[in-house]
Amino acid sequence: MRYSIILLLIIFCPGIYAQTVSDSSKAVITGNVYSEKENKLSGVPVEIIGEEDKYTVNTDGSGKYRIELEAGTYEIKVVYPEYNIYSFRNLSVSEGEEKYLIFFSLRNHSAQKR
């Protein structure tokens, strides 16, 4: 049942959408990070790696992250101790654009070993 719900989320709620950022020459990448049990994860480092720059931002208490950066193409990584590493490559953002990326269903390695 849980996997059916996750599959429906993938089909009906795509993890990325774009909208325009008002009054900004920067691009914005924003989103949420959830556990496999759909709990919001706070304090998770989200790494944004570009050709010349690397940024790291942590999720807040609601599992949300947001970063303003230069337009370009980036790899987004979620690296959290005892959880799988997830990444999204070749995410292109334009000047004034905001992209929303959801990382959900992170799996806890320590829970899998028990």
Image (tube, helix red, strand yellow):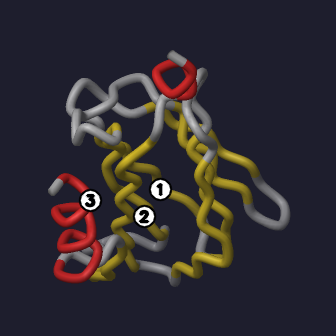
The structure residue drawn at horizontal position 59% and vertical position 66%, both measured from the top left corner, is 88
Amino acid type of the residue that numbered disc 1 sits on in the rendered structure:
Glu
| Front tag of 2 and 3 | 3
Q: Earlier in the sequence, mark 3 or mark 1?
A: 3
Give neighbour class at mark 2: few <14, some 14-19, many 20+ (Cα, 10 Å): many
Relative to 23, does residue 40 appear above or below in the rendering? above
User: Could you tell me which residue is drawn at 15 percent across and 57 percent down?
Assistant: 1
Q: Measure the alpha-carbon separation of dots 2 and 1.
A: 4 Å
The correct choice, above or below, for 114 with respect to 10 in the image is above
Which residue, given by chain and number where applicable, does mark 3 sit on?
3
Residue on which the image places disc 2: 28
Tell me the distance, in whole angstroms, between the alpha carbons under discs 3 and 1: 33 Å
Relative to the observer, which residue lies in front, 88 or 96?
A: 88
Name the kind of residue labelled 2 in the image.
Val
Residue occupied by mark 1: 68
Q: Is residue 30 above or below residue 9?
A: above
